[in-house]
Amino acid sequence: MTDTAHSTTGSMTYPQRLLMTLVVVVLALLIWHALQMFLLIFAGIIFAIFLRKNGDFIHGKTGLSANWGVTIVIFLLLILILGVIWLMTPNITDQVQELNKQLPNSWKTMKENVSENSVGGWFLKRLPSLEQISGSIGGLMQQATSWLYTAVGAITGIFILLAIGLYGAYDADTYIGGAEKLVPKNKRDRAKRTFHGIGATLYWWLIGRLFSMLIIGIFTVLGLWFLGLPLALTLGVFAALMTFIPNIGPMIAVIPALLLAVQESWSMVWYVAALYAGIQMVESYLITPLVQRQAISMPPALIISAQIIMGVIQGVIGIILATPLVAVIIVVIKLLYLEDVLDDHDIHIQAEDRENRAEN
């Protein structure tokens, strides 16, 4: 009798389960209809995690409070951003203008060279023009991302991201503690570990992306400069930015470099293609595996599938945030399904294990 009463009080009643189901359904519908805003909030949470984790690191090394650590991180970021703008903007601005002038000529030169071959001529007749490609892409992404290309939308988006990031970083304990209180008391330890695992995974994913962007940008600039291809700095910065988007970004980054190489010679085209391929091999087989040991291993097919789905639903912002969303889902499945439901206790979250080793 006692066991029965304990089982009844320890589990949710039917009205509670019904209410929980309704809440989940309403949240799912709300997220679906306002998915773009939720993705922006998710980006703000990632930014908050980045600030707070680094603030905690400074707190551990200096003894300053975590909030002072966050303030120092923000100050250092501002110095870095302003320094990059001051040093690189004049050169990049000039090179971007030159790139806009040269790309149409490069496209025309490539079509003329390829059309001299019978197979190439047949292919080009069926290939849409550069204007048609641009128009198709613009039409495809217009509905999902049009607000980003308006001044109000861009300013609002940046304000939301910064606000969530700053408030989340400075008052992280309040938000995490409030979320934990929504969970039954006997499940709060599990919720705490889940939040910790998600935070660690997103932090090390972001650190890995930033590190990859830095390496790709440096290697690309140096490689193109060594080959003698013009506008190496702009192409390197573009390659670095595209690296933030796994799988798809590097394929986009190589296109302007190849078009410029066409104006030089076909040998230059092969050299540039080999350079980008070599850099991506280093990133894929050396940098990424090292980073995944610190964060979470994600099957490439799963990432590509998520990018395609999120790209169709939400355009560019969906493609960018597809990978961290997959990382969060994997952590939740591991901790709340495999470990709790299936009772598989041989579950490890790489980022969480790394932070535990660092603390010990």
Image (tube, helix red, strand yellow):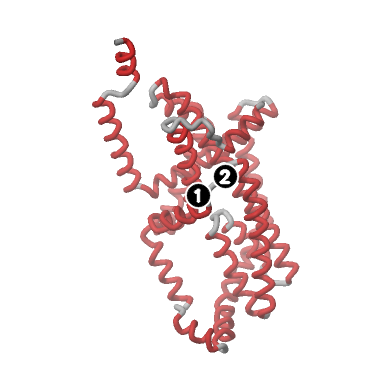
* Up-down relation of residue 245 to residue 264 (above or below): above
Q: Quadrant of the N terminus?
A: top left
Query: x, y percentage for residue 5?
Result: 30, 13
**Residue 85 seen:** no
Residue at (27%, 26%) from the top-left corner? Answer: 16
Q: Secondary structure at mark 1?
A: helix
Relative depth, front residue between 10 and 39: 10
Numbered tag placed on residue 58 in the rendering: none
Relative depth, front residue between 317 and 296: 296
Q: Is residue 30 left or right of residue 121?
A: left
Task: Identify residue type, mark 1.
Answer: Thr
Residue on which the image places disc 1: 323
Quadrant location of residue 137? bottom left
* Up-down relation of residue 354 to residue 250 (above or below): above
* Up-down relation of residue 141 to residue 317 (above or below): below
Task: Identify residue type, mark 2.
Answer: Trp
Quote the CA–CA distance across marks 1 and 2.
9 Å
Query: x, y percentage for residue 270?
Result: 66, 74
Task: Please rate how many residues cluster around mark 2, counting C-alpha atoms within 10 Å: few if below 14, some from 14 to 19, many from 20.
Answer: many
Q: Secondary structure at mark 2?
A: helix
Q: Are marks 1 and 2 in contact (CB under 8 Å)?
A: yes
Residue at (27%, 23%) from the top-left corner? Answer: 13
Residue on which the image places disc 2: 205
Quadrant location of residue 188? top left
Query: x, y percentage for residue 127?
Result: 46, 79
Residue at (64%, 32%) from the top-left corner? Answer: 57
Query: x, y percentage for residue 297?
Result: 56, 45
Residue at (56%, 43%) from the top-left corner? Answer: 296
**Residue 232 seen:** yes
Q: Residue furthest right?
A: 226
* Up-down relation of residue 203 to residue 289 (above or below): above
